[in-house]
Image: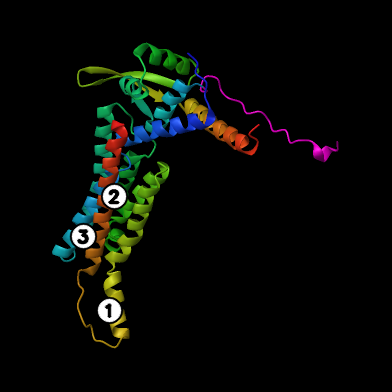
Amino acid sequence: MSKPVFPTSALADLDKTQSRVRAARWVTSLPLIVTGAAVVTTASFEILVEGSIAGQVIGPFSSVLIWLLLMVRAKSIGLGLGREGFGWIALVVVILSVILFPVLMVTGGLLLPSLGLVLAGWRGHDLVTWASAAALAVATPLLQQTFVEDLIRRAQLAAGSEAAFETPNIDPTILGIIGLVVFAIGLRRLRQDGVITRA
Amino acid sequence: MSEHDQPEVSSPIEFNETVHQKTRLGILAVLREAGEADFAFLRKTLGLTDGNLGRHLEVLASAGYVESRSGYNGRRARTWIRLTPAGETAINLELAALKELIIRLEHDPR
């Protein structure tokens, strides 16, 4: 009954087992897909509706959706929710989104879910998730404050030209592109999850 | 031979015999990642028979490393196995010991 354990092969086996469980849970792909979709939707609203506060609703909704989808997925295959703490993160994001509503008007509603995803990625030892979420957490408040548009305007003024061309939607467009990239990373990882679980 | 010429003797690495076994290590690895898992998932993922998995779970449960509970998924009965805090500590110590052993083997492969 007792098989010997060799250190290198044991660690490799453990790594493989944990990768299979992680892939089966979709825990490194689904949060990125949902967050990416939330960012694209928020950016679209900002382009289409001036002064849109869609992000304040979509942000906390995305955190809850990630938790719900991961829970349904985990239970359906016979696993627990893991150590990332998506349930707690969703709860805190929803509460803070209500309490800090005026602050989030300035920073953008996607800041809190992005920070939540940084925490989840860090707790799950998933570099891609927390790095992507960290990039979003930095970009969201800047782009909410028309950072790029102001930068272009200042550059034009410095160059002596009087607003040579208007760039009214450049910031939400960049936000949308970042969202698409995050979404694409998530989809790619979902395909990898399928390969790992079928192997 | 002077005192400085003595080869450095490192303390022996101690392994927990309950955890230091391939199948039980696999069970704990699954539980460490997911927190809990049902019996069927463990059996399928680790390629074990019901009896074999049951015996290994008994060993882990008697050491206080896992605990089980019964639940339902619709009409189907399920047995969920959960990692206890003692189990988490045990697998973390095992991982640390394995890594330490690899480091020592790399430095002194005799």
Label 1: which secondary element? helix
- Residue identified by numbered label 2: A185
* Residue A63 sits inside the magenta stretch: no
* Residue B34 position by quadrant: top left
Q: Which mark is residue A11?
A: none
Sequence-first disc among 3 and 2: 3
Q: Which mark is residue A153?
A: 1
The magenta-colored residue range is B1-20
The Cα–Cα distance between marks 3 and 2, rounded to whole angstroms, is: 18 Å
Query: From the viewer's perspective, is the residue at label 2 or at label 1 nearer?
Result: 2
Q: Chain of mark 3?
A: A
Asked if labels 3 and 2 share a chain, the reply is: yes
Sequence-first disc among 2 and 1: 1
**Tags 3 and 2 in contact by the CB under 8 Å rule?**
no
- The quadrant of the image that shows the C terminus of chain A is top left
| Residue A46 shown left or right of residue B50 in the figure | left
Q: Residue furthest front?
A: B110
* Residue density around tag 3, few if under 14, some if 14–19, many if 20 or more, within 10 Å: many
Q: Chain of mark 1?
A: A
- Residue identified by numbered label 3: A43
x, y percent for residue A6? 53, 27
x, y percent for residue A150? 29, 75
x, y percent for residue A30? 27, 42
Kind of residue at badge 1 = Arg
Kind of residue at badge 2 = Ile
Please name the predominant secondary structure of the magenta segment in the image: loop
